[in-house]
Image: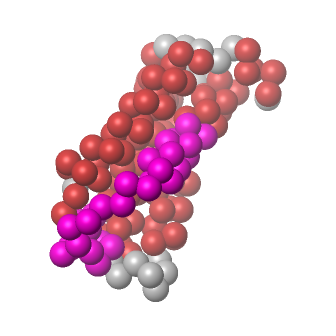
Amino acid sequence: MFTILTDISWLSVLLAFVIYFILGALWFTVFFPKLYKISLGKENDTTQSTAPIFFVGPALCCLVITIASALLVYALHIETYQSALQFAVIVGVGYLFSNTVNIAINPNIPRPILYGLISGSYHLVGIILVSIILLAMK
């Protein structure tokens, strides 16, 4: 499977990664900032950490997810937008959304279902965009 590394359009990986990462920034700061804060029990907290880990960490995770998705799109010979969407839904719901909800279900997150819905939905939408971009530029 790793012989396909030379077949991958790395420009598509870069573009898909950037879109996925920017979507996350918008998702949590513009689209759903209030609900996200509520899910974390910080609705009255006005401070926001600017530590590098809060920018670099999500970027690296988005990059890894995008590269793994590219490997699978090429290895599975996904050639149609319908197949790309099916792939995105399977990966998005089966791994990203489910794992996000699972991580949220712990005593440190006061509203785990809300957190899971907000963060999981971001990853589902993100992987759909990633899959479409990877196929479009294949």
Q: Point out the residue furthest to the bottom here.
A: 107
- The residue lying at 33 percent from left, 73 percent from top is 40
Percent x, y for residue 114? 31, 70
Pick the front one: 79 or 111: 111
Pick the front one: 82 or 101: 101
- The residue lying at 39 percent from left, 31 percent from top is 19
Q: Would you identify the image quadrant in which residue 111 lies?
A: bottom left
Magenta span of residues: 35-64
- Which quadrant holds the C terminus? top right
- The residue lying at 45 percent from left, 16 percent from top is 136
Q: Is residue 107 left or right of residue 77?
A: left
Q: Would you identify the image quadrant in which residue 132 lies?
A: top left
Query: Considering only vertical position in the picture, is 101 above or below 111?
Result: above
Percent x, y for residue 110? 35, 82
Percent x, y for residue 16? 46, 28
Percent x, y for residue 7? 69, 14
- Numbered label tally: 0
Query: Considering only vertical position in the picture, is 10 above or below 45?
Result: above
